[in-house]
Amino acid sequence: MERRFLIGGSGGQGILFMGKLMAAAAMISGKNVTWFPSYGAEIRCGTANCTVIASDEPIGSPVIKHIDVLIVFNDMSLKKFIHRLKPDGILFYDSSLLFYENGTSGIKAVGIPATTLASELGSKKSANMLMLGAVASVTDMLFLKKDALLSVMENDSMKLPSETLLLNKIAIAKGFDIVENQKRSNL
């Protein structure tokens, strides 16, 4: 099985870091992986996106045309990439930063107020990790398990400061919890 993710937003929102964690979690879970970052020269507040492909088979190219899961943190990324989302794909968007009205049949749209909830946790910079927890819970991918994500984050070569690491762990758990609570309330 192969899954193709595209994450888009503005520089400084942790778009590339989120993709890097997803790719590393897939790798330690035994998947073949590509992580392909793209960002403007201005970086902070400019556009940033990355693709992550995780597969049981060898991956021919890191370039993807059709996306299984689209994760966006700004309106520009939504407009730029929504047409590449497969008809049965999943769109995750930060509902505290943008509005999306699902007009495309087959697309499952999941709005998570990641920036607002991350601010309540202590830093809006952890919105990417909160969204990552939600994505992992909804997609139920074998490589996006909470333990694998936390393990990768703890062993990351950038060595996050302990307070950032703790906040990111809390944010990932919060993202999981939001979706799990929604699943329980829909039963």
Image (cartoon, rainbow, N blue to C red):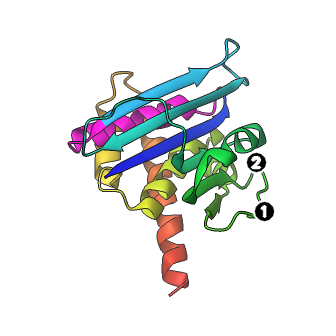
Amino acid type, label 1 = Glu
| Residue in the image at 25% along x and 46% along y | 56
Query: Is residue 184 in sight in this rendering?
Result: yes
Mark 2 belongs to which amino acid? Leu
Occupied quadrant, residue 92: bottom right
Q: Mark 2 packing: few (<14 Cα in 10 Å), some, or many (20+)?
A: some
- Label 1 CA crowd tier, 10 Å (few <14, some 14–19, many 20+): few
Q: Is residue 38 magenta?
A: no
User: In the image, what residue occupies the spot 45% across and 44% down?
Assistant: 4
The residue positioned 71% from the left and 14% from the top of the image is 42
Q: Position of residue 182 (x, y in %)?
A: 55, 75
Q: Nearer the viewer, residue 91 or 157?
A: 91
Instruction: Write down the region rendered in magenta.
Output: 11-32
Q: Quadrant of residue 78?
A: top right
Res. 97 mark? 2
Task: Specify whether 142 is left or right of 76.
Answer: left
Q: Measured from the top left, where is residue 187 in percent x and y?
A: 50, 88
Count the labels in the image: 2
Residue 20 highlighted magenta (yes or no):
yes
Q: Quadrant of residue 7?
A: top right
Magenta span dominant secondary structure = helix
**Label 1 element class:** loop
